[in-house]
Image (cartoon, rainbow, N blue to C red):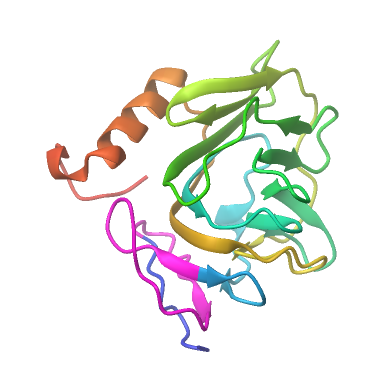
């Protein structure tokens, strides 16, 4: 552990993740995921303005959850003192919850639980100017829940931690892969296509170098 920039960002933003993981498993849905030990493992991306997805955002991740004991954090965009944008499995639950701090109506539970020890694609989108039902969650490319939120994500500095909350713990137990953060509110069709491509990576169609 402690290797700087071990987890590579595929975009020109260079938001590489620093390694603070002791678990050794590398099983993945798309390529190589990372196991998290449910105790203190995490990946941290230092603060970068490109992570400040304040007005609109899409976040995707593949997760393979091993246990629901305690809170389990998938990822968290955070400032030095505040949680800003994250997906967490609440205590003893396999139903994920999305939270965007600073947005009125910024807490939204996914509509259903996920299966343990099975790869699942989670996605959330938010568009400040998207009108009614502008905050959405998706499971395996299908709309799961939606509601109307107002306002923008709070914060002035933006880092990312995968696998644990920097303030309250909630270490993830299982595997995480392909955490993707975009400053666009992707459409339902885009989310579905993203899921379909990643669920069968051998059938990828590549038209240019990867850059979002």
Q: Nearer the viewer, residue 84 or 196?
A: 196
Q: Position of residue 198 (x, y in %)?
A: 30, 41
Can residue 86 be seen from the camera position used here? Answer: no
**From the image, which quarter does the C terminus lie in?**
top left
Q: Quadrant of residue 46?
A: bottom right
Q: Is residue 165 above or below residue 114?
A: below
Position of 79 with respect to 57 (left or right) is right
Q: Quadrant of residue 102?
A: top right
Q: Quadrant of residue 150?
A: top right
Q: Name the magenta segment's main secondary structure.
A: loop
Question: Which residue is situated farthest in the bottom direction here?
Answer: 2
Q: Position of residue 45 (x, y in %)?
A: 56, 69
Q: Nearer the viewer, residue 148 or 158?
A: 148
Instruction: Identify the residue at image location x=58%, y=72%.
Output: 44
Q: Nearer the viewer, residue 188 or 24?
A: 24
Q: Is residue 48 above or below residue 147?
A: below
Position of 112 with respect to 106 (left or right) is left
Q: Position of residue 136 (x, y in %)?
A: 62, 24
Question: What residue span does the magenta drawing correspond to?
Answer: 10-35
The total of numbered circles placed on residues is: 0
Residue 159 counted in the magenta span: no
Residue 22 counted in the magenta span: yes
Q: Is residue 48 above or below residue 131?
A: below
Instruction: Identify the residue at image location x=66%, y=38%.
Output: 95
């Amino acid at each position: 552990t402690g290797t700087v920039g071990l987890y590579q960002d595929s975009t020109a933003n260079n938001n590489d993740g620093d390694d603070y993981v002791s678990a050794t498993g590398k099983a993945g849905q798309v390529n190589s995921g990372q196991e998290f030990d449910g105790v203190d493992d995490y990946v941290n991306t230092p603060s970068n303005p490109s992570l400040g997805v304040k007005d609109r955002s899409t976040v995707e991740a593949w997760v393979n959850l091993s246990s629901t004991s305690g809170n389990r954090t998938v990822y968290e965009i955070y400032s030095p003192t505040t949680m800003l944008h994250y997906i967490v499995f609440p205590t003893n639950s396999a139903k994920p919850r999305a939270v965007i701090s600073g947005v009125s109506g910024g807490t939204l539970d996914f509509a259903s639980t996920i299966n343990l020890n099975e790869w699942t694609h989670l996605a959330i989108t938010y568009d400040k100017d998207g009108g009614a039902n502008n905050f959405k969650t998706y499971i395996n490319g299908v709309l799961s829940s939606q509601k109307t939120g107002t306002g923008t994500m709070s914060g002035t500095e933006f880092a990312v931690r995968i696998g644990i909350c920097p303030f309250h713990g909630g270490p993830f137990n299982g595997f995480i892969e392909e955490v993707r953060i975009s400053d666009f509110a992707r459409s339902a069709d885009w989310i579905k296509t993203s899921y379909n491509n990643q669920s069968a990576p051998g059938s990828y169609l590549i038209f240019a170098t990867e850059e979002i």
